[in-house]
Amino acid sequence: MIAPKTAHSQPAEPLALFGGTFDPVHFGHLRVASDTAAALRLPELRLIPSKKPVHRDATSANAAQRLAMLRLGVSEFPGLRIDDCELIRETPSYTVFTLEHFRERFPERALIWVIGIDAFLGITRWYEWQRLFDLAHFVVLNRPGFAVANALSASLSSVWNGRLTSDVSALRTNLHGQLYLHTVAPQAVSATEIRNMLLEGASDNALRPLLPASVLAYIRENRLYTGPT
Ligand code: ATP
């Protein structure tokens, strides 16, 4: 039975979403997602692997392999979950479609799209990007010392100035529409670097600091990233 809503009822907990290609997932993704969820007291954060990247080249590993690696990686980070909604739906992995899907499923929960600053700076190239803020908040992960305001394009700058909040509770009291800047410890790792290292025959010792051992074992067993795609 659904409890009736009263004036005293608590707002529903926000749902945080972290999208990416995860080709492969690495400690940069996992630590940053986990630390952000803890720092902002977000009870639920779902990693969303994209089917086919819409803003970049094709992935190297296929969707099933990327999902399998994500499952292995997430198992070491309690609190992180995976949602395969972009993999199972027919439409392209446009974030605006993904957010519509979550908004329909959870009309009373604030939605929070967590995104690295580099990806955020290119957001005006995303499909129907202005509608994103009618669906979700954005938590932008910044590097220490990086002046975001100086890096914004003119169109993004007006959105930034209008929506930025330094009050984290605004991510709970409103369902969408705020921008919140969260500074994270830099994680010097990218999936591109890992793929290049594998292509060049890097040893397990060299790779182990960059991604969970279970993910590395899966890569080795399936001979991923060892040749051109
Ligand atoms: P690639 O090197 O293939 O571009 P990536 O490692 O950047 O991949 P993505 O799956 O493209 O990973 O990124 C998903 C999200 O994770 C993006 O919002 C991106 O900014 C963020 N991210 C990736 N690597 C890091 C990192 N080392 N520290 C913090 N955020 C990261």
Image: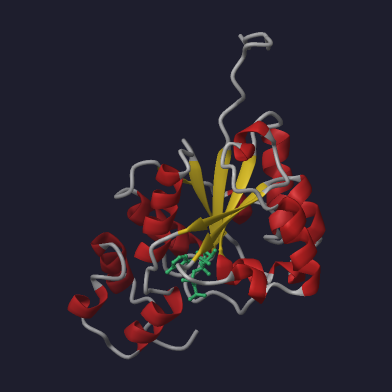
Between 35 and 159, the one nearer to me in the picture: 159
Residue 33 appears in view: yes
Quick check: 13 left or right of 208?
right
Quick check: 29 left or right of 15?
left
Name which residue lies at 81% across and 69% down: 155
Name which residue lies at 73% across and 52% down: 163
Residue 26 appears in view: no
Question: In the rendered view, would you say 9 is above or below 182?
Answer: above
Quick check: 52 left or right of 39?
right
Q: Pinpoint residue 162: horizontal percent, then vertical percent.
A: 77, 54
Question: In the rendered view, would you say 175 is above or below 229?
Answer: above
Between 135 and 46, the one nearer to me in the picture: 135
Between 168 and 81, the one nearer to me in the picture: 168
Q: Pinpoint residue 132: horizontal percent, then vertical percent.
A: 75, 53
Between 131 and 206, the one nearer to me in the picture: 131
Q: Pinpoint residue 156: horizontal percent, then vertical percent.
A: 75, 66
Single out the residue that lies furthest toward the left. Answer: 205
Q: How many marks?
A: 0
Name which residue lies at 74% across and 54% down: 96
Q: Pinpoint residue 159: horizontal percent, then vertical percent.
A: 77, 59
Identify the image quadrant of residue 144: bottom left
Question: In the rendered view, would you say 133 is above or below 92?
Answer: above
